[in-house]
Image (cartoon, rainbow, N blue to C red):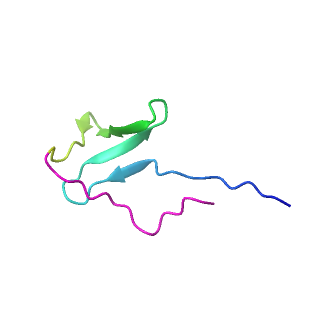
Amino acid sequence: MLTRTELRTPRQRGCERCERREVWNERNGSWRIDVEDDDRKVGNPHCIHEWDIDGTFSPFE
C-alpha cells in the first residue's frame, strides 16, 4: 500500500542577527517582510541574514 507524503514548508522566518521577520506569501510564491501593528520588521538592510532554521522543523509529516 502506497501512502502519500506531504511536503511542508515554513510559513515564517526570522533573522537571528537583526530581527528581520518574513512570512511566506502563497499568492506570489515568495517571502515578504512581516508587518505587525503597522510596523514593518525590516531589520538591517546590510545584514547577511542568519535565519532561525534549525533541526526541529520537519518538512515531512
In this rendering, the answer to whether 54 lies above or below 8 is below
Q: Residue furthest bottom?
A: 55
What residue lies at 23% left-to-right and 37% top-to-bottom?
Answer: 39
What residue lies at 33% left-to-right and 44% top-to-bottom?
Answer: 22
Q: Position of residue 50 (x, y in %)?
A: 26, 59
Q: Residue furthest right?
A: 1
In this rendering, the answer to whether 15 lies above or below 56 is above
Q: Residue furthest top?
A: 27
- Nearest to the observer: residue 14 or residue 38: 14
Which image quadrant: the C terminus? bottom right
Q: Is residue 53 left or right of residue 42?
A: right
Q: Position of residue 44 (x, y in %)?
A: 15, 47
In this rendering, the answer to whether 50 lies above or below 9 is below
Q: Residue 24 appears in which quarter of the rendering?
A: top left
- Nearest to the observer: residue 1 or residue 26: 1
In this rendering, the answer to whether 49 lies above or below 37 is below
Count of marks placed on residues: 0
Magenta-drawn segment: 46-61
Q: Is residue 4 left or right of residue 39?
A: right
Residue 56 in the magenta stretch? The answer is yes
Q: Residue 60 appears in which quarter of the rendering?
A: bottom right
Q: Is residue 2 left or right of residue 6?
A: right
Q: Taken as a whole, is the magenta stretch helix, strand or loop?
A: loop
Q: Position of residue 42 (x, y in %)?
A: 22, 42
Which image quadrant: the N terminus? bottom right
Residue 1 in the magenta stretch? The answer is no
Q: Is residue 29 left or right of residue 39?
A: right
